[in-house]
Amino acid sequence: MTSPTAMASEAAGSLIDELERLASHIGHARERIGRIIFGQQEVIDQSIITLLAGGHALLIGVPGLGKTRLVETLGAVFGLSEKRVQFTPDLMPADILGSEVLEESESGTRSFRFIEGPVFSQLLMADEINRASPRTQSALLQAMQERRVSVAGLYRQLPRPFHVLATQNPLEQEGTYPLPEAQLDRFLLQVDVGYPDADAERRMLIATTGTLEETPVQALSAADLQEAQRLVRRIPVGESVLEAILTLVRAGRPDSTTIQAVRDHVAWGPGPRASQALMLATRARALLDGRLAPSIDDVLALAGPVLRHRMALTFSARADGVTIDQIVRMLAEPLG
């Protein structure tokens, strides 16, 4: 009879083999995305981390930085069915979810048929999400949280996996509706997309303005991604990393922290979903780097993307020029 210790050792060895094999495949996917998207390696990594953790991402950046192309490339490389919705003030929930239409057969029999909306995809790009009305945003909120939608009194399951990658322009605020806190909290990461450096922009110019432009090549399938998401949840997390996550998140709550700057400048802080997001994201980042367990460095690297959209400043703090990123760096400093 095999002893419990031997069984545990065998299970651990099997997990390590699976993680190493998966890390190799993800490394190929990462490389192929990098051939299409120039100078945005951190953005690429955070987007892949979002998919590996089974979450949604909010991409914030000015126009022309490749946010749409990034989502299309992710869909192609990971073998996901991808659809795009351009959000506008007159967009209705049915334009996203779908609707029932009345049809009449040749015999005269009438019946309703449901026509699926673009939300019935594995990767939904919500372009300029803050231009939609609160009513439409609330329809997407249910899909993001429950992976199902309610249409005509019936629940309809969405495809698996299901991810929303939403974009937002930080400059044009006229005609926009701020995302409610409940919806912001459903995004695993807020990914800030900046300008590429000079070398990356040079390579992009050469690669994208010639006669031949590289196209994305599939490296994984939707089933592979789902398997990766299951494995991410099995990656062990050390006690020091767990404590770092709890310390960081709880320190950002003005009603329970001892940090005076948080009490003075933060209106509301991150909830328990932030801790869950940080735990999953650190595991996914470790897998992306080919490591078998996350470290404090993963917590520090992901503190900003996880927390910056889950905290709000007071009016006086904004008037004094305080930023959320400054607060997050102050919270993370003791961990480093």
Image (cartoon, rainbow, N blue to C red):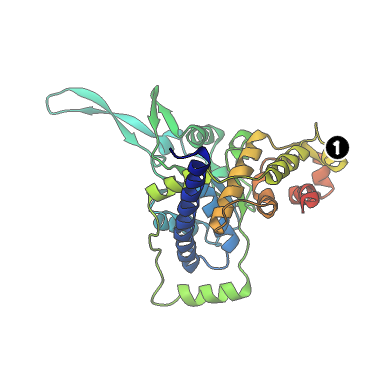
Q: 145 or 45, which is in the foreground?
A: 45
- Crowd tier of the residue under label 1, counting other residues whose Cα lies within 10 Å: few below 14, some 14–19, many 20 or above: few
> Residue 91 vs residue 302: left or right?
left
Residue 132 appears in the figure: yes
Furthest-right residue in this view = 260
For the point 62% across and 38% down, the residue is: 276
Local SS, label 1: loop
Q: Position of residue 69 (x, y in %)?
A: 47, 59
Q: Position of residue 22 (x, y in %)?
A: 46, 55
Q: Position of residue 60 (x, y in %)?
A: 60, 52
Report which residue position mark 1 lands on: 258
Q: Position of residue 77 (x, y in %)?
A: 41, 58
Can you say which quadrant of the picture contains the N terminus?
top left
For the point 40% across and 36% down, the residue is: 158
Can you say which quadrant of the picture contains the C terminus?
bottom right
> Residue 42 vs residue 127: left or right?
right
Compared with 178, 44 (above or below) is below
> Residue 216 vs residue 142: left or right?
left
Quarter-of-image position of residue 179: top right
For the point 61% across and 42% down, the residue is: 277
Compared with 11, 39 (above or below) is below
Q: 220 or 122, which is in the foreground?
A: 220
- Which residue type carries mark 1? Thr
Residue 127 appears in the figure: no
